Image: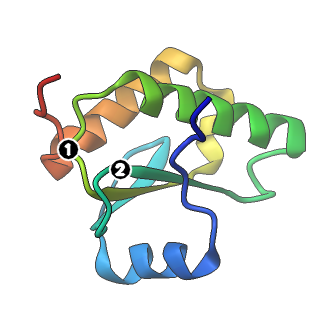
C-alpha cells in the first residue's frame, strides 16, 4: 500500500507559506506552491481553536479523502490547507465544494486521467 503524499515537516510548511499564493473562503485558506516532485502533496494545518483533537482529526481525514478522490489536480504542487474556525460546523460536502472552489481560483484543476 502506498503512503499518502502529505507535507509533514515544518520546513516544507514554511516554504509553502512563503513561496505559495493564497486564496481563502469561509472554510479554509489554501496555499499552493510548486514542488520538484512528480506528484502533488497535501498539508493540513488545524489550530486548537477549531476544536478538540477528535474534531480536528475528523476534519483532516475528510480533507485527505477529498484530495485523494480528486485526481484532476495538476502534478507537482504543494497544497496547504489552513482550517478556519467556522469549518467545525460544516459537512463533508461543504468541504468538497470549498476545496474545489479554491482549486479553481488557483487554476490547478484540469489534468485529465
Q: Is residue 106 above or below residue 19?
A: above
Q: Residue at x 41, y 21 (%)?
A: 69
| Percent coordinates x, y for residue 75 in the rendering | 24, 48
Q: Which mark is residue 24?
A: none
**x and y percentages locating residue 39 in the rendered image:** 33, 49
> In the rendered image, which residue does mark 2 sit on?
40
Q: Residues within 10 Å of mark 1 (few under 14, many from 20)?
A: some
Residue 32 position, x and y percent, is 31, 61
Pick whichever, 83 or 75, lies toward us. 75
- Is 43 located above or below residue 67 in the figure? below
In this view, the residue in front, 3 or 42, is: 3
Up/down of 11 relative to 97, above or below? below
Q: Pick out the residue farthest to the front.
A: 1
Local packing at callout 2 (Cα closer than 10 Å; few below 14, some 14-19, many 20+) is many
Task: Please give the residue where the numbered disc 1 appears in the rendered image.
Answer: 74
Left or right: residue 26 compared with residue 82: left
Answer with the quarter of the image where residue 55 lies.
top right
Q: Nearer the viewer, residue 67 or 24?
A: 67
Q: How many numbered badges does the structure rendering display?
A: 2
Task: Tell me the CA gap for discs 2 and 1.
Answer: 7 Å
- Quadrant holding the C terminus: top left
In the rendered view, would you say 10 is above or below 97? below
Q: Please state which of residues 85 and 107 is positioned toward the viewer in this rendering.
A: 107
The reply to whether callout 2 and callout 1 are in contact (CB within 8 Å) is yes
Left or right: where does residue 16 sit relative to residue 106?
Answer: right
- Label 2 sits on a secondary structure element that is loop
> Residue 50 at what x, y percent from top left?
74, 49
User: What quarter of the picture does the N terminus occupy?
Assistant: top right
Q: Residue at x 82, y 45 (%)?
A: 51
Can you tell which quarter of the image residue 73 is in?
top left
Amino acid at each position: 500500500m502506498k503512503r499518502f503524499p502529505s507535507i509533514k515537516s515544518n520546513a516544507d510548511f514554511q516554504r509553502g507559506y512563503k513561496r505559495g499564493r493564497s486564496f481563502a473562503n469561509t472554510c479554509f485558506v489554501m496555499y499552493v506552491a510548486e514542488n520538484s516532485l512528480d506528484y502533488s502533496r497535501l498539508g493540513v494545518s488545524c489550530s486548537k481553536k477549531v476544536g478538540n483533537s477528535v474534531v480536528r482529526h475528523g476534519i483532516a481525514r475528510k480533507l485527505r479523502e477529498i484530495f485523494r478522490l480528486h485526481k484532476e489536480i495538476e502534478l507537482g504542487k504543494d497544497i496547504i490547507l489552513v482550517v478556519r474556525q467556522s469549518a467545525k460546523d460544516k459537512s463533508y460536502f461543504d468541504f468538497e465544494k470549498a476545496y474545489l472552489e479554491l482549486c479553481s481560483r488557483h487554476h490547478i484543476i484540469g489534468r485529465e486521467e
